[in-house]
Amino acid sequence: MSETSRLDDSFHVFDTTLRDGAQREGINLTVADKLAIARHLDDFGVGFIEGGWPGANPRDTEFFARAKDEIDFRNARLVAFGATRRAGAKAAEDPQVRALLESGAEVITLVAKSHDRHVELALRTTLEENLEMVRDTVAHLSARGRRVFVDCEHFFDGYRANPEYAKAVVRAAAEAGADVVVLCDTNGGMLPAQIQAVVATVLADTGARLGIHAQDDTGCAVANTLAAVDAGATHVQCTANGYGERVGNANLFPVVAALELKYGKQVLPEGRLREMTRISHAIAEVVNLTPSTHQPYVGLSAFAHKAGLHASAIKVDPDLYQHIDPERVGNTMRMLVSDMAGRASIELKGKELGIDLGGDRELVGRVVERVKERELKGYTYEAADASFELLLRAEVQGSPLKYFDVESWRAIVEDRPDGSHANEATVKLWAKGERIVATAEGNGPVNALDRALRVALEKIYPQLGSLELVDYKVRILEGRHGTSSTTRVLISTSDGKGEWSTVGVADNVIAASWQALEDAYTYGLLRAAVDPAA
C-alpha cells in the first residue's frame, strides 16, 4: 500500500457510498460493484472509504476479504462500520465487535446513540449504560491498534432534546480514544445556521475533533456540511452523487469542489479534482443510474449556455457567466442551440464544432433564422448536435451534405390472425451513381427501416458497419389540427468511439424516425471522414 500520495491528517474527506449510499432505493451493489466503486474513489483521492458492515451480512464480509487482496489503495484508508457493543455485555466478548477486528480494516467507525429517547426506546437501556457502551467499545478497539471514529446518530435532534446528554456522548467517545466524533443529522431536518451554531458550541464545550454527516431531506446537506466546516469540523462524510436513503446524503463532489475551489483547502492529492466529472459518471455507470445532467460541477448541463444574452457575454469572457473554469473539475463548456440562440451562440457553437464562420454576419443571421424557424415546427437542436452540425454545414456550403439520395421508402406492419406481427421495410436510393433497393425485416417498423437503410448503404460505404442505434426517444408535441399532432424523434447513434444525436419531426412517428435516421447515417459518414464527392 503506497503512502506517497496521501495528504496530512488535518482534514478528512470520508466517503460512505458503499454503505450509506447503497441504501438508496434502486441501488443493489454486488461485491464486484463495491470493489469497482472503491477503486474509483481511491483514484479520486478521498482519504477514507467506508466499505460496509462486516459480520452483519455476507456481502460486506466478502468485500473486506477481497479488498485486502485485490485493491492497492494509494490514497484512501478502508473503513469498517459497526455498532457499539450490546448493553450489559463486554466489548471483548461481542461477536460483531470481533468481526470488525477480523475485517482487517485499519480504521473503524462505530455508530452510537446520542439521542436520549433513542437510548431508552431503541436500545432499551439506561443513559449511563449507553455511555459505558461507547467507552468500552472505543477503548477495546483502540487498544488493538485500530483508529476509531464515532458516528453520533441523531445527534442534532438529540442535542435539541437534551443537549447535555448529547455532549456527554461526544466526551465519552473522545476520552476513550476516538480520533473523530461525527455529529450526524440522521433525519436530515436541520438548516445551515442551526448546524453551524450547534457544531461551534459542541466544539467549544468538549474540545473533541468533530466531523459532520448530513442527510439531504431539506435539500441542505451540502450547505449543512460546509456550515459545519465553518464552525470548526475537520471531517466531512459524503456519498458519490449524493446517493443515500430517502432523498440522499451530502454529495461528495460539490462538497469537495467547494472546499478546494472556494475555501482554498487542498483535500485531494494534486491534480485529482480534474478527474471529478469522470469519476462521478463512472460510479453512476456502476450503480446503473443515469448521471444527473443538472448536478453541480459534474453534470452535462453544469456549464451549458442557452440564452443568446449569455452567449454574447461568454464570447467576450467566459467567466462572466461561469463561476469556475469547467476544466478545473474535468467538465466542459457547451453552447446549446435553440430558438433562444443569437449570433454569438451560433458563432461559439461553430467554433466548438470546428466550423469557421469567418465573421460572416449574413451567414450567421441565416443560421439563426433557420434554427428559429425549425424549432417553431418542433425540432430541438440543443439535444441533437449532429443534426445542427449538418444544418450549419448546409448553410456554409450552400447545399446539404449528401452521401446518398433517397428515391422512396416504405414500412409495412402486418397483423396476423394468430396474434403475431411482421415488420418489413423497403428503401430505394442512389449512391455513387448506383440505384440500390434493399428490404429488411425488424422487430418494429423503425427497426426494419434502420436495417433496410443499413443493408442498402453498407454495400457502398462499409464504414457504416460499426454504427449502432443506442437510444430512441419519441415525444408527441401539441395537437395542431383537431386530433392530429406533431411527433418528434431523437435518435442516439454510436460508432464505438463516440455518440451523436439526431432529430426528426413529422406528423407521424415513422416519418419523423426516418428523418432522424437519415441524419444519423449522414453524420456517421462525416465522422468517418468519407468524401461525399468520391
Image (cartoon, rainbow, N blue to C red):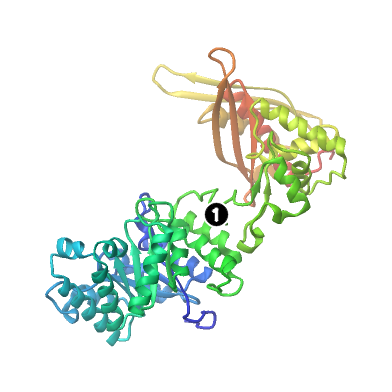
Q: Residue furthest top?
A: 482
Mark 1: give few (<14), some (14-19) or many (20+) Cα within 10 Å: some
Q: In front: 376, or 461? A: 376
Q: Does residue 113 lie above or below 467 as drawn?
A: below
Q: In front: 410, or 305? A: 305
Q: Is residue 283 left or right of residue 394?
A: left
The residue shown at (52%, 28%) is 444
Is residue 220 among what the camera can see? yes
Residue assigned mark 1: 296
Q: In front: 131, or 110? A: 131
The residue shown at (55%, 12%) is 482
* Residue 281 image position (x, y, % from top left): 53, 56
* Residue 133 image position (x, y, % from top left): 19, 76
Is residue 453 among what the camera can see? no
> In which quadrant of the rendered view does residue 52 lie?
bottom left
Q: Does residue 179 lie above or below 463 as drawn?
A: below
Q: Does residue 73 lie above or below 308 as drawn?
A: below
> In which quadrant of the rendered view does residue 183 lie?
bottom left
Q: In front: 346, or 99? A: 346
* Residue 498 image position (x, y, % from top left): 64, 50
* Residue 198 image position (x, y, % from top left): 36, 66
User: What is the quadrant of the C terminus in the image?
Assistant: top right
Task: Look at the numbered disc 1 and give the secondary structure of its residue.
Answer: loop
